[in-house]
Amino acid sequence: MIKRLILFFHLFIAAAGYGQHLNDILTVTKVQTVNSDSINIFTIKLSDSIKIEMVLVEEGSYNMGSDKGYSNESPVRRVQVSDFLMGRFEVTQELWYFVMRHNPSYFSDCENCPVERITWPDAMQFIERLNELTKLHFRLPTEAEWEYAASGGRINRKVFKYSGSSKTDEVAWFKTNAGSRTHPVGTKKSNSLGLFDMSGNVYEWTRDWMGKYRKDQKLNPKGPEKGKARVIRGGCWHDTEEGCRIKCRVEMKPAEKNGCVGMRLVHDATPFRD
């Protein structure tokens, strides 16, 4: 018996053509099955073939960090995160090209694979242009938001080492199974929030500078105000199982890029609930 209640909210955004501002037209469609959990998915349709699916991650608290991993994962602290929406998939090459009109990816033969070889400023420029097109306010996730969502948010009932499973191969494209390249998004098992590839495929830029966790930050914690390297999360196709752990933190200079690093979108939840 299927036990899932999924509400699909479709934002159909019409445009006269590329380069013009998209009209902010909202249409709501609800598709329901039966489940003890509920997952809210907001679909922003940019064209007949291009869409962005955003999952509602409801507010909650969790233990951020780990005392059993690398030194930069501690100290463990209890933090609270407010509602937000997170991209169900990593930003694909198809979506990137629609917005930017070029494809920087090393593995450019796969439009449904995650975009990669992007710097942190590249990610910010993409978001700026996407926001101009949609009249919305997309951004990158904080580390706290990323880890909370990867863990399954408030509907998570099990503690997994990776996002959605303690078996890497079920949820991640990594060094052992990826064949030395990226793969189409959403082809592995999702986590309990319906988010795909939070472990493996490509690392994902966050908005935070790398820094030591502060125990005094309890509500929507953010990284230091300045730094030399940003935090990337999630592991990638070239990484070992260790890099794909939910708790693993990796630093990267904002101007650096390689075929292992991409991005995922986040949006504040309030505008979608009004």
Image (cartoon, grey):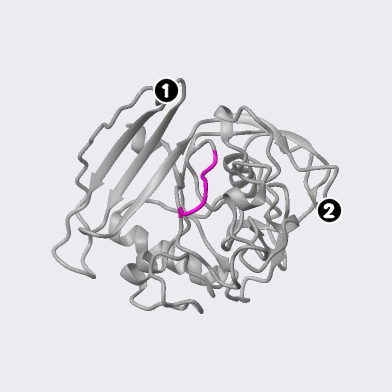
> Magenta stretch containing residue 111, yes or no?
no
Q: Amino acid at mark 2?
A: Tyr
Left or right: residue 108 compared with residue 147? left
At 69% across and 65% down in the image, what residue appears?
239
Q: Is residue 50 above or below residue 222?
A: below
* Quadrant where the N terminus is found in the figure: top left
**Which corner quadrant of the image does residue 221 belong to?**
top right
- Secondary element type, mark 2: loop
Could you tell me residue 156's position as x and y percent?
59, 30
Highlighted magenta segment, given as a residue range: 186-191
Query: For the view shown, which residue lies furthest in the left direction?
Result: 16
**Which corner quadrant of the image does residue 68 belong to?**
top right
Question: Label 2 belongs to which residue?
Answer: 70
Q: Upstream in the sequence, badge 2 or badge 1?
A: 1
At 56% across and 61% down in the image, what residue appears?
201
Could you tell me residue 143's position as x and y percent?
64, 49
Query: For the view shown, which residue lies furthest in the top direction?
Result: 36
Question: Label 1 belongs to which residue?
Answer: 35
Label 2 or label 1, whichever lies nearer to me, is: 1
